[in-house]
């Protein structure tokens, strides 16, 4: 009993110390809210870890709030955050338009807003760190162009595009970028179907139905790696072998990289989560202290990234990468879950 | 005098009355047949064995979920937790046995043991959640809607918490064989779901348990006075509903070769729609599982049609909503016809 009491007192003291230390730490530079759109997606959960770690490296305490993919919930979270007067808010918007007024409200209250991953052009913000969702569509289009040419001798064939939820602008942007580039190839037929609520079995159902209705499908392009897993399960159930129907996915999640290793997937278009998060930390001091951010090229975790001053504010664009079986094991890809251990240094 | 005569039931011969009853009892199957004929005639690529096999396969998950839901509704209650139960029952075995992502990749010797082991895990999870619902609803007399709504929320939260939003993928081949082996182009798990329907349809119609829960759903006081153990039967029904949702989760994990944190979202309302379309009264005490299966097939047929047409997927949910309303109207119409002709 005595030992238990000692342990209890010790643990309580430890917790108190930790809380006090956190408080002191937070006072040194301040608290930052990270508004994450959902936690039902590996990219987002990894982004929480990366942002909390990197912003911690440069002296900020991060509180992450999950909106469960609901724009109204995120608006309420923004309101709650504004009342607490944090040093800054990092926003990965559920809905680009719906959050516009919340951004304006925060900035009017003197709170800088940094946009993460999901670019918002319709209203000014203080800093934007993106790979570019439309650009992910471009990268996917270039890879699909190459794969179709390798298979059919020219860029022609049938592509089944499985989107995410049709209400999610993230997926619609990828679709826009992809289809814009593919317009140059009239020999390519694109069948586009959304997987409602980004739910994997919905993607599996689409693939099953389309394989029966259009047995000549050359390639399947899914907008997230967890949908690729369901697509592969449906291919397998239809008796297909790895590589028989080509597969391209986006976001670079671990399961996508595993599918490349197993030969089911040809290309995973990566969103560089770690670099996108690191860029926020590198520029955080400048944003929060309202210092000028200069346009130019910056090295973010080894990636040459370009800062431009746009109508909506300073914008850093970090190149997405095409992951294939040749480079799948490189540690720079977040899907390999090896977050950089070196502390991030603020831009001078 | 005229109006009085119009209100009188029309006298039909026993043979005609039986025919009317047969049509009314199987109206959903008739609607399904009409829908399939129309789609086959108008939608390119629809009329082929592969598509019909897909419809049966895709009915597996919502269909299995709807079996349990129908049982609890026939018994006069509700269970909103089935969708989240399905999610947890898919996630836990996926985490234990999958090779990639969150999976621990546990292997058993001989390899086929993974089938009963993972199935038991899923069923046990479902039964446990069902038991917790039963405890709160039956023992503590709390409102089933609120209790199971709470379970719907906390169980999905638990899925997210244990997975951290990540997924477990790559179930072993010994387990995936149930998803990749087909008989008449329909995977084994879909056959298992059909067998489930047949077994529970038999239980509901031909066993004392089935007859008693139907009586309890119609009026719980009378069976209680007749000495039927109402509380025990209700508790069993909640546990069965949970276990069946667990089975649906197991099927879904096999189909997707693992689980992600949002697996199965949206299936609760589809299962409800199937149950209502299938003629189960939300007031309890009425309904047959054959109608529910027809309802599930009807929903799947429409989903497949939308997949094959160039219609935006948003319309799926609009059509589902319209179908549920139509089913309720049809139910009223059936009551009127029954009152008039039988």
Image (cartoon, grey):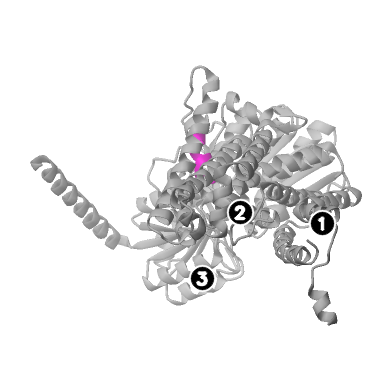
| Residue range highlighted in magenta | B86-94
Instruction: Name the residue that disc number 2 marks.
Output: B266
Residue A71 place in picture, x, y as percent: 55, 65
Residue B138 place in picture, x, y as percent: 42, 54
Q: Please report, as a chain letter, where disc 1 is located.
A: B
Instruction: Determine crowd level at label 3: few under 14, some 14-19, many 20+ residues with C-alpha closer than 10 A.
Output: many
Residue situated in front as seen by the camera: A160 or B171: B171
Q: Please report, as a chain letter, where disc 2 is located.
A: B
Instruction: Name the residue that disc number 1 marks.
Output: B17
Q: Quadrant of residue A200?
A: top right
Q: Please report, as a chain letter, where disc 3 is located.
A: A
Instruction: Name the residue that disc number 3 marks.
Output: A103
Residue B331 place in picture, x, y as percent: 72, 62
Element type at mark 3: helix
Asked if labels 1 and 3 share a chain, the reply is no
Residue reaching furthest to the right: B41
| Residue A336 belongs to magenta span | no
Residue at figure coordinates x 49%, y 44% from the top left: B88
Element type at mark 1: helix
Residue B313 place in picture, x, y as percent: 73, 56
Q: Is residue A321 visible?
A: no
Residue reaching furthest to the bottom: B1
Residue situated in front as seen by the camera: A210 or A140: A210
């Amino acid at each position: 009993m005595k030992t238990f009491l000692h342990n209890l007192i010790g643990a309580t003291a430890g917790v108190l110390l930790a809380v006090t230390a956190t408080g002191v730490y937070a006072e040194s530079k301040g608290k930052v809210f990270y508004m994450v759109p959902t936690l039902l997606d590996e990219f987002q959960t990894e982004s929480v870890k990366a942002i909390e770690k990197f912003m911690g490296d440069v002296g900020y305490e991060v509180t992450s709030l999950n909106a469960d993919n609901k724009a109204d919930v995120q608006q309420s979270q923004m309101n709650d955050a504004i009342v607490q007067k944090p040093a800054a808010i990092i926003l990965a918007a559920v809905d680009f338009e719906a959050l516009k007024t919340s951004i304006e409200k925060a900035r009017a209250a003197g709170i800088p807003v940094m946009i993460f991953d999901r670019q918002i052009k319709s209203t000014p913000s203080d800093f934007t760190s993106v790979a570019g969702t439309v650009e992910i569509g471009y990268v996917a289009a270039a890879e699909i162009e190459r794969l179709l040419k390798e298979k059919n001798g020219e860029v022609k064939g049938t592509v089944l595009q499985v989107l995410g939820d049709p209400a999610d602008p993230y997926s619609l942007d990828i679709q826009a970028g992809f289809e814009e580039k593919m317009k140059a190839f009239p020999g390519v037929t694109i069948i586009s179907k959304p997987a409602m609520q980004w739910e994997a079995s919905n993607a599996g159902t689409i693939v099953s139905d389309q394989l029966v209705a259009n047995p000549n499908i050359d390639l399947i392009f899914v907008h997230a790696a967890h949908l690729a897993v369901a697509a592969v399960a449906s291919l397998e159930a239809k008796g297909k072998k790895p590589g028989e129907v080509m597969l391209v996915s986006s976001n670079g999640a671990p399961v996508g990289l595993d599918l490349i290793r197993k030969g089911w997937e040809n290309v995973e278009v990566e969103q560089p989560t770690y670099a996108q998060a690191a860029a926020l930390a590198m520029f955080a001091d400048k944003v929060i202290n309202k210092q000028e951010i200069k346009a130019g090229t910056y090295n973010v975790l080894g990636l040459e990234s370009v800062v431009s001053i746009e109508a909506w504010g300073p914008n850093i664009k970090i190149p997405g990468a095409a992951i294939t079986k040749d480079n799948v094991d490189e540690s720079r890809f977040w899907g390999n879950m090896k977050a950089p251990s070196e502390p991030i240094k603020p831009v001078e | 005098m005229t109006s009085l005569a119009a209100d009188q039931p029309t006298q039909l011969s026993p043979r005609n009355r039986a025919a009317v009853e047969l049509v009314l009892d199987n109206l959903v199957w008739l609607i399904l047949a009409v829908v399939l004929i129309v789609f086959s005639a108008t939608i390119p690529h629809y009329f082929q064995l592969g598509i019909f096999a897909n419809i049966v396969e895709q009915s597996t998950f919502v269909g299995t979920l709807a079996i349990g839901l129908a049982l609890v509704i026939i018994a006069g209650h509700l269970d909103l937790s089935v969708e989240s139960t399905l999610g947890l029952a898919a996630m836990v075995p996926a985490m234990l046995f999958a090779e990639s992502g969150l999976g621990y990749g546990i292997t058993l010797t001989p390899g086929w043991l993974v089938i009963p082991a993972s199935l038991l895990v899923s069923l046990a999870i479902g039964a446990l959640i069902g038991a917790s619902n039963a405890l709160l609803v039956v023992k503590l007399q709390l409102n089933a809607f609120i209790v199971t709504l709470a379970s719907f929320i906390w169980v999905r939260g638990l899925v997210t918490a244990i997975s951290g939003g990540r997924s477990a993928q790559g179930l072993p081949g010994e387990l995936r064989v149930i998803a990749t082996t087909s008989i008449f182009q329909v995977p084994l798990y879909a056959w298992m779901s059909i067998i489930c329907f047949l077994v529970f349809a038999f239980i509901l119609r031909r066993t004392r348990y089935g007859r008693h829960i139907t009586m309890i759903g119609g009026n719980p006081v009378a069976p209680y006075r007749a000495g039927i153990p109402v509380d025990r039967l209700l508790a069993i029904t909640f546990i069965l509903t949970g276990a069946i949702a667990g089975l649906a989760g197991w099927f879904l994990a096999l189909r997707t070769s693992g689980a992600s944190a949002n697996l199965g979202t949206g299936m609760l309302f589809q299962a409800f729609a199937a149950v209502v379309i299938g003629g189960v009264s939300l007031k309890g005490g009425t309904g047959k599982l054959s109608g529910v299966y027809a309802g599930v097939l009807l929903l799947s047929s429409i989903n497949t049609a939308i997949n094959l047409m160039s219609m935006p997927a948003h319309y799926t949910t609009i059509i589902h909503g319209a179908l549920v309303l139509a089913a309720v109207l049809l139910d009223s119409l059936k009551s009127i016809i029954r009152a008039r002709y039988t």
